């Protein structure tokens, strides 16, 4: 039972990382990154590392997301309308 | 001894020898300069300037040689080589990352196999 | 960034203090329970972020000067280095307080136990110093990026102004 | 710009393949090869340093210098951000 | 039995992140990809120190004596997480300034320095 | 026990303390005083450390241990604490690096008057200094990674310090992404070695080293990441951008920081892997990286128009000389005959080139900085006829350019001579490439000298004056170092270079200093 939960969490980590790269909307990508961080912190707890889990949940999921959103907000200003915001062609 | 000779196993290196060599060279240069050509005349073909890749200045104008025309012939002759080399430095970050990954892969193939 | 509505602000005010107290607990019990300076510092920095979001940058920076956070950070780091220098009679960063009695010097029984708060020597001191540093540092990053957000989006020569 | 991309993709696959094989080969999951240093920490941290949390005693005592460096990295980041968003001259 | 699946996750995260750094054009996407690679190294270190059946390396909470997971990788990971935050903050700062100067987030247009 | 055994810890923690306190220095005069004090103090500490190592042999320092030399606690076969290990090579690198840093710091003092938040610059400068010295004294892999990160993060901030110039931000961003990625793969390498050997100490890993697939993989990751940090050719793209856009004092400093990464590469190749790694592949990889760096760096430099960008390309090509010299030493490591025939000479040349490069390349960047200070540009098309207006700068530039081109009475020639002759034994092609590089170096500096300093004076540069005294003093430090290195190569070779080369080759003594006589 524990193993299945473990595998499910690992799979969800990979999926959320994939979506963090795949989404064209940058806000969605950042939220996806935040979810990945939270899941990784859960995985750290499963691997018996609560110290690191707390640090990852606080720093990785909380503060990193905050500064990402600040950067997004700064880069979405209306000084250059229609340029740069969601311009993310896939190679 | 502090100031001395360095032996490399193939030859030697001494500061004073070189200083003396340069002094000698300077003497020779001074001597040559003192025996300049007597038949120099102003205003003849002898004043014409060879000036690669640039317009020849009019008389009386200062000769300010811009840096981009230095070694004009050299770069002109090697232009195909330089085109390849300059086009490698694209300025795009993704290409730099790609070259990094290619280098890691090549070196790991070399060392691991 | 405009401040949020009054309901949200009140709730944030109340919850932020709980978060801060929890962060202080995590820092102080770093040598007994999971946690320590970094984790607790990050939690307290979340408290700063919460206040910043709820009240908007203008009024928040009206209460607190951003230099305070930088000085927190510097003070924490200087305290950490000084802990290192104090152990220099033996070696740099030597734990000169552990098991000596006195401050943070009591012993703990071997094996799984609840632990004694007054133990572990310089580890606890360094925890507090690093906690101070991380609180200051992370809050300063948040505030500077917040100010930089306006610097980038407004542009021009006015740039980052102090909200004094 | 199609040509370089394909080359990068090929070498990317090669590099990642080698790396993943290396990661897979380190040791089976859950059975570290050598644990002498960590066993020393687990057995002696409590009696030597009187700290119940082994990780904290490593972070702040046994490898305290790393932590000083880490705090310095954070300080560096703060200083850099502050210097880049400094007031206009 | 989950035979080395965590390590495969590490590999998958690395692949995704490196793909993003190499082939994405938006610089915020590149920063996100770097963050993903950071997470994969953190996970790698923790998986390295896991011991089956081990308990948390904290005596206050450890149920059973002297069978704990290895504590050193956890200390290293703690360091690596904070370093990751520092570099991410600096990268985002640079991205904000780049946007101010260039008005774009496309990595192919940020190429004034070349040759 | 004299206090001098604490020098490895002090030499890192004094600049760190200086950085932490410097944010409180709001008065400009006080800040400048603090800046100069800490710089001089750290340089003196580095000198004392070099002297201690030269007299007493390899210095081992256990961070936070019961005694400063208790590397192995009772009953253990592995060291458990962080151990600083300074042998003659590390001490030599720290000494050379601190002298160049002192000069660039003195040069930067006047620069601080022009910026608003000078104490942040001071803090970043000290942190970069601490990171560089930490790279050179540490004997622990993870600690090495931490100092690598301190040095890189500080240099991102310093490169982008002119944040109103778009190019500076762009250069810093490129360097930041590449460097972060490279640091992460370095960390993966460290993790692999930890997983196999259960320890992080370099000497302990070297003692137990059995080279297999995983060790080779870790080696590849280390070599590539450190080669990128030091700017070897296929990975050099960031270097002209970054060095060209940084403030001049910082460019001079970044040169020695790059050499610190080079130090790490040689330390790993010689002391950690050493003779356990069979075959010549690694040596040839390093030599080929060196050849490429030499040639492509200089050939790109010839066509540049920006003075600092041109010098940055030269920095790449000089890195190539060091890589080739020490790579030849690595090639000869397994047989003592080859070592006495060419290997040791090549290593002496490579190590001598490290200190030479720190001096003259630093001086060149400083002269470019004073050109920028006086005229506001470093574009060579817009300069001309400065020789009469800036006599000191012209003199310094001439000395440094002659030294870097390897004109005979100067120090550059000595190290290049050693490299030419030893590489000729291995294959003449190597020596030919080295010589062609040297000639092209001379050519490109003749170009800079001609278009920058000679020629008629331009109208728009009529108000140019010589730079202030403190800048001249900063340049003078390096100029005096260059002239004294040229005047007494024998003393330098015997006392600075040869012990360093001997300690770098001698893997057994490196291991023995930490692990005791159990080898």
Image (cartoon, grey):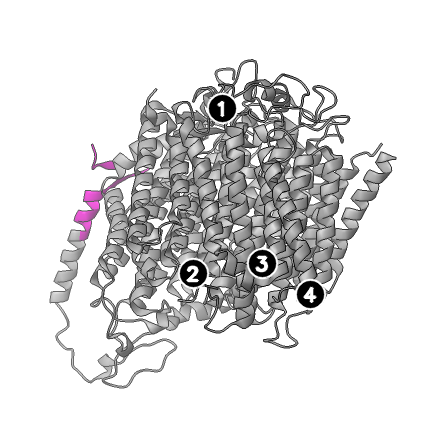
Closer to the observer: label 1 or label 4?
Answer: 1
Crowd around label 1: few <14 · some 14–19 · many ≥20 (10 Å): many
Residue A11 placement, left or right of E100: right
Numbered marks: total:
4
**Both marks 1 and 2 on one chain:** yes
Cα distance in 3D space between marks 1 and 4: 50 Å
Closer to the observer: label 3 or label 1?
Answer: 3
Residue at horizontal 75 percent and vertical 45 percent from the top: A39
Q: Can you identify the residue that label 4 sits on? A: D2
Q: Which residues are magenta?
A: B1-22
Q: Can you identify the residue that label 3 sits on? A: E92
Crowd around label 2: few <14 · some 14–19 · many ≥20 (10 Å): many
Cα distance in 3D space between marks 4 and 3: 29 Å
Please tell me in which quadrant of the rendered image residue C38 appears: top right
Closer to the observer: label 2 or label 3?
Answer: 3
Q: Can you identify the residue that label 2 sits on? A: F244
Q: Is residue F130 magenta?
A: no
Pick the residue in front: E31 or F343. Answer: E31
Provide residue B63's location: percent of width, then percent of height.
27, 77
Residue F211 visible to an observer of this rendering: no
Provide residue B4's location: percent of width, then percent of height.
21, 36
Q: Can you identify the residue that label 1 sits on? A: F511
């Amino acid at each position: 039972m524990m193993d299945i939960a473990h595998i499910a969490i690992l799979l969800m980590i990979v999926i959320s990382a994939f979506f963090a790269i795949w989404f064209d909307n940058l806000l969605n990508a950042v939220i996806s990154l935040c979810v990945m961080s939270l899941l990784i912190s859960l995985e750290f707890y499963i691997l018996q590392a609560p110290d690191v889990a707390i640090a990852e949940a606080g720093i990785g999921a909380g503060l990193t997301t905050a500064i990402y959103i600040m950067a997004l907000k700064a880069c979405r200003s209306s000084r250059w309308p229609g340029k740069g915001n969601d311009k993310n062609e896939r190679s | 001894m502090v100031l001395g000779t360095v032996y490399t196993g193939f030859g030697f290196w001494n500061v004073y020898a070189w200083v003396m060599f340069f002094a000698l060279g300077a003497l020779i240069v001074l001597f040559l300069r003192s025996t300049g050509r007597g038949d120099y005349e102003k205003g003849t073909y002898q004043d014409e300037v060879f000036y690669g890749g640039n317009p020849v200045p009019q008389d009386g104008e200062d000769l300010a040689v811009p840096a981009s025309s230095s070694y004009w012939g050299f770069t002109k002759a090697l232009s195909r080589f330089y085109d390849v080399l300059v086009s490698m430095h694209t300025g795009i970050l993704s290409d730099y990352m790609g070259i990094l990954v290619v280098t890691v892969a090549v070196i790991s193939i070399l060392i691991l196999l | 960034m405009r401040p949020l509505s009054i309901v949200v602000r009140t709730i944030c005010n109340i919850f932020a203090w709980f978060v801060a107290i929890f962060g202080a607990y995590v820092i102080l019990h770093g040598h007994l329970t999971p946690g320590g300076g970094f984790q607790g510092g990050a939690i307290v920095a979340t408290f700063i972020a919460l206040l910043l979001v709820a009240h908007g940058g203008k009024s928040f920076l009206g209460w607190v000067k951003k230099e305070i956070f930088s000085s927190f950070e510097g003070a924490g780091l200087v305290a950490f280095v000084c802990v290192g220098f104090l152990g220099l009679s033996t070696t740099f960063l030597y734990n000169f307080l552990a098991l000596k009695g006195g401050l943070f010097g009591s012993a703990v029984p071997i094996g799984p136990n609840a632990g004694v708060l007054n133990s572990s020597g310089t580890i606890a001191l360094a925890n507090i110093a690093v906690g101070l540093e991380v609180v200051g540092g992370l809050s300063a990053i948040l505030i500077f990026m917040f100010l930089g957000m306006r610097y980038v989006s407004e542009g021009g020569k006015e740039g980052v102004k102090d909200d004094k | 710009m199609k040509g370089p991309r394909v080359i990068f993709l090929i070498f990317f696959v090669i590099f990642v393949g080698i790396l993943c094989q290396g990661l897979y080969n380190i040791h089976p999951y859950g059975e570290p090869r050598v644990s002498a240093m960590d066993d020393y920490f687990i057995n002696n941290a409590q009696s030597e340093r009187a700290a119940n949390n082994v990780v904290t005693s490593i972070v702040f005592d046994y490898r305290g210098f790393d932590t000083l460096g880490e705090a310095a990295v954070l300080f560096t980041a703060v200083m850099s951000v502050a210097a880049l968003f400094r007031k206009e001259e | 039995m989950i035979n080395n699946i965590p390590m495969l996750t590490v590999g998958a995260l690395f692949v995704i992140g490196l793909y993003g750094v190499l082939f994405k054009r938006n610089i915020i996407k590149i920063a996100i990809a770097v963050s993903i690679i950071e997470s994969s190294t953190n996970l790698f270190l923790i998986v390295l120190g896991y011991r089956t059946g081990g308990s948390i390396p904290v005596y206050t909470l450890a149920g059973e004596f002297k069978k704990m997971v290895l504590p050193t990788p956890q200390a290293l990971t703690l360091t690596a997480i904070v370093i990751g935050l520092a570099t991410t903050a600096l990268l985002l700062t640079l991205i904000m300034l780049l946007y101010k100067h260039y008005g774009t987030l496309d990595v192919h247009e940020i190429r004034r320095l070349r040759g | 026990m004299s206090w001098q055994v604490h020098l490895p810890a002090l030499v890192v923690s004094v600049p760190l303390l200086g950085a932490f306190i410097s944010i409180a220095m709001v008065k400009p005069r006080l800040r400048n005083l603090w800046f100069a004090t800490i710089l001089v103090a750290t340089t003196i500490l580095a000198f004392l450390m070099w002297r201690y190592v030269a007299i007493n042999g390899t210095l081992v320092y256990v961070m936070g241990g019961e005694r400063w030399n208790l590397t192995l606690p009772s009953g253990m076969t592995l060291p458990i604490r962080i151990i600083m290990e300074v042998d003659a090579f590390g001490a030599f690198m720290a000494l050379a690096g601190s002298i160049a840093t002192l000069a660039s710091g003195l040069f930067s003092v006047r620069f601080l008057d022009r910026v608003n938040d000078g104490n942040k610059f001071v803090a970043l400068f000290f942190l970069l200094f601490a990171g560089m010295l930490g790279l050179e004294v540490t004997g622990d892999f993870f600690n090495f990674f931490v100092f690598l990160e301190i040095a890189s993060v500080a240099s991102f901030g310093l490169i982008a310090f002119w944040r109103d110039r778009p190019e500076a931000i762009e250069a810093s961003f490129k360097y930041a992404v590449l460097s972060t990625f490279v640091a992460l793969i370095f960390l993966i390498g460290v993790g692999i070695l930890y997983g196999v050997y259960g320890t992080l100490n370099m000497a302990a890993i070297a003692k137990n080293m059995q080279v297999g697939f995983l060790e080779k993989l870790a080696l590849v990751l280390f070599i590539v990441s450190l080669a990128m940090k030091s700017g070897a050719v296929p990975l050099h793209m960031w270097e002209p951008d970054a060095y060209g856009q940084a403030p001049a004092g910082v460019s001079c400093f970044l040169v020695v920081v790059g050499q610190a990464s080079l130090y790490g590469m040689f330390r790993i190749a010689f002391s950690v892997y050493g003779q356990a790694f069979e075959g010549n592949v690694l040596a040839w990889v390093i030599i080929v990286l060196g050849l490429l760096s030499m040639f492509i760096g200089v050939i790109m430099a010839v066509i540049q128009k920006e003075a600092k960008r041109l010098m940055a390309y030269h920095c790449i090509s000089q890195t190539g000389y060091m890589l080739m010299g020490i790579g030849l030493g690595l090639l000869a490591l397994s047989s003592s005959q080859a070592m006495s025939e060419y290997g040791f000479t090549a290593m002496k040349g490579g190590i001598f080139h490290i200190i030479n490069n720190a001096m003259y390349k630093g001086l060149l960047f400083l002269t470019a900085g004073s050109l920028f200070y006086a005229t506001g540009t470093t574009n060579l098309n817009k300069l001309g006829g400065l020789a009469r207006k800036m006599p000191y700068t012209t003199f310094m530039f001439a000395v440094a350019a002659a030294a870097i081109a390897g004109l005979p009475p100067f120090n550059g020639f000595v190290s290049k001579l050693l490299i030419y002759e030893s590489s000729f034994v291995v294959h003449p092609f190597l020596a030919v490439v080295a010589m062609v590089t040297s000639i092209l170096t001379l050519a490109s500096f003749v170009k800079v000298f001609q278009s920058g300093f000679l020629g008629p004076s331009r109208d728009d540069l009529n108000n140019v004056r010589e730079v202030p005294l403190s800048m001249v003093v900063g340049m003078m430090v390096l100029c005096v170092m260059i002239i004294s290195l040229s005047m007494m190569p024998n003393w330098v070779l015997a006392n600075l270079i040869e012990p360093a080369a001997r300690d770098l080759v001698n893997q057994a003594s490196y291991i023995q200093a930490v692990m005791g006589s159990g080898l």
